[in-house]
Image: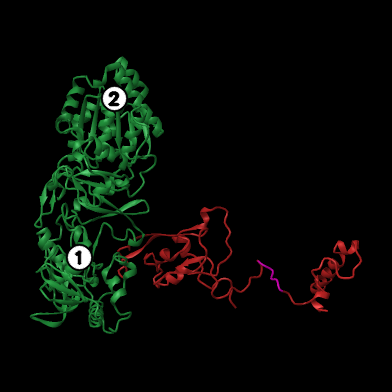
Amino acid sequence: MDSHEAHDPHASVPPGAPAGDLARDLFFPEIVKGMANTIKHFFQPQKFTIEYPEKKKDIPRDFRGEHALKRDAQGRVKCVACFLCATACPSECIHIVAGPTPAAWTDREKYPVKFDIDMLRCIYCGMCEEACPCDAIELTSKFYQVSETREEKYFQKDKLLQQPEKREYPDEA
Amino acid sequence: MPTIKVNGKEYDAPAGKNVLQFCLDQGLYVPHYCYHPALTIAGNCRMCIVKGSGPGLRPGLMTSCTLPVQDKLEVETEAPDVQKAREGVLEFLLINHPLDCPVCDQAGECYLQDYSFKYGRDRSRFVEKKVTKHTKDVGRNIRIWGNRCIVCTRCVRFCEEVAGTGELNVVERGDHSIIDNFPGLPMDNLLSGNTADICPVGALLDKDFLYQARVWYMETADSVCPTCSVGCNLKVDTYQGQVKRLRPRENQAVNQWWLCDIGRYNHKFTSAPNRLGLAKTRGVATAATAAIAATAVSAPALEWERCSLDGALARTWETLDKFVRAEGAGAVAGLASAWLSNEELFLFRKFMKLGIGALDLGLVAHQDGEAHAFKSGFKIHADRNPNRRGAQELLGADAAKDGLKRVLDGIRAGRIKAVLAAGGIPGWEPDPALLAALRKLAFVAVLDVAEDAPLVSVAHVVLPGATWVEKDGTFTNAQGRVQRCQRALPPPGVAAPESDLLQQLLVLAGKREKVLSAQGVFAELAAEVPAFAGLSYRDLGGQGKCLGAAADPAVAAR
């Protein structure tokens, strides 16, 4: 006889068991078995959980968290308002208003007057980062997203420029 | 007629026509930059190169724009050596061209981009330093990015041959060649905006549209220009609910390929903050009793109240009706506007005659501007209204000419007590006598588009209407050509096309069962007005048809 059939763990009534056994019908032996397994692991030294938020996990290098707008060497926004991120964005959450640069910026003609990302629409796919010809936008490793209002999740240029750089947070040791 | 062979297929071609235009007419696309059907042939971009052979012709690669059709000519447009030559031409054109497509406004409608993608190499072999050239304003509306220029000289030939002003020329030599205006002669002619349209690359750009929108985001509707009675065909480009630019649309019978700057930039009023998005009324109850008591309270002394559109329409109809009952139909007059579409003028007359029974109809119109004519025959009319001709047909030539004077006389004589007036004319400075007369009236209902429009200042009821980009309709230009304008945007707030508002008034008057689309109204109009007989939206198509086309084959051919 096939051994698999003989010890089918999913069979409601094991073969040869007497009918109407109350302890078995209440899954009592199974519960005891399960608890024994749990208690066994409880006393083992190896731990799989971390004490968040006091301790933080290492975020993988390519993690796609909240966006940041990067700055150039002079501290100006790197973005040139080419709209390629907004064009690539599948959830249409990037809203840019372009304008001529301030007169002092002699190397560039166009920059974003407004650069808004609706984080509640964003799906964190990273297409904006991939499309950017100037390496001006990136998805940082910042992943916790708490806000009390919807408006706070509508990130504007100032907020995006103040985001931490990629992989700076949390401590990467 | 000479027989020529293009890509192995025989065609009968008109002698003397250039092979490039012939191929384009046949739907055989040959890439080109410097050739434009309106301009003389320059043959300098070398992009339209084809392989040709024929009697008296040294066989080989030649530019198809400079190659006239002759008998037994054989042309190949996609031969391997043609493709290789094109690739070479593009590589040369791109030698000094910056890789700034992401910040260039032309990206998306740039022929250099498109052809590079389709015919060009995928990378440059050029390792030297690129030549850099000036970026400067060459005129009031146009700026040149010299680095992007491929010196096709379309703009130079345009200014010389179409505008007839010749401000631009090529300066410097060799790879330093660059377009510039003559010192002290900026390109301020009234057709200057067209140079940005015909520029195949991003060298000449319109300062008004600069950085406004990436072109692939914009939606386009075919329309006509309302700024003068020429009625240039144009495209309305919109982005995020705003008109961003107007571009000419080819119509050889009207505007060739061009659009003047006066019309091109006259779209700001459509998205101005002063647009009327709500209906409002003031002192209508007083006005209604005033009809009987004959103690009019002039509108400017009263405070505005907000009102639903339906409420405002109902009050308009009820009050006008009360005046008719108390004083007779002669107490109400109508002032239509030369900015209304044919359909709206038709409905306006219908409401005034059928709904009210009014005796007097007049026409208000924008004050005349300056007329201009250009070397190519392009014209700007002094009549700065899109539909004066339509008003003459639909209100009657007499009403369109002298109606306004009669209405004014009627008001001054105290016979006319209430007026339904349509405005919607941007930048209109009406005769002060008209406003002074209207100000004395017991009741004025106005269809207009701007909060600070002249007519609104004397109104008791304001019904918010739509600008020409927000409605479907037709305008009749000065030559009698009926042309369609198509809706590109929704009107703001509760505003609605005047054709809808006037039909709702007709419904209230019990003269109509339901509100029809502009197309439905036009069908009704064509059935009732002889001049428009035989016309329909389908017949009008993209280029319009002349009035009386059904009766006269000579007119139909126009």
Chain B visual colour: green
| Farthest residue, direction top | B293
Q: Nearer the viewer, residue B28 or B304?
A: B28
On whether residue A50 falls in the magenta region, the answer is yes
Asked if residue A97 is among those painted magenta in the image, a careful observer would answer: no
* Residue B290 spot, x, y in % from top left: 32, 18
Q: Residues within 10 Å of mark 1 (few under 14, many from 20)?
A: few
Residue B518 on image: x %, y % = 31, 41
Q: Amino acid at mark 1?
A: Asp
- The answer to whether B275 is drawn above or below residue B328 in the figure is below
- Which element carries disc 1, helix, strand or loop? helix
| Chain letter for the red part | A
Q: Provide the residue designation for mark 2.
A: B356
Q: Quadrant of residue A32?
A: bottom right
Total number of numbered discs in the rendering: 2
**Do circles 2 and 1 both sit on a common chain?**
yes
For residue B67, side relative to residue B297 (left or right): left
- Where disc 2 sits, the SS reads helix
* Highlighted magenta segment, given as a residue range: A48-52
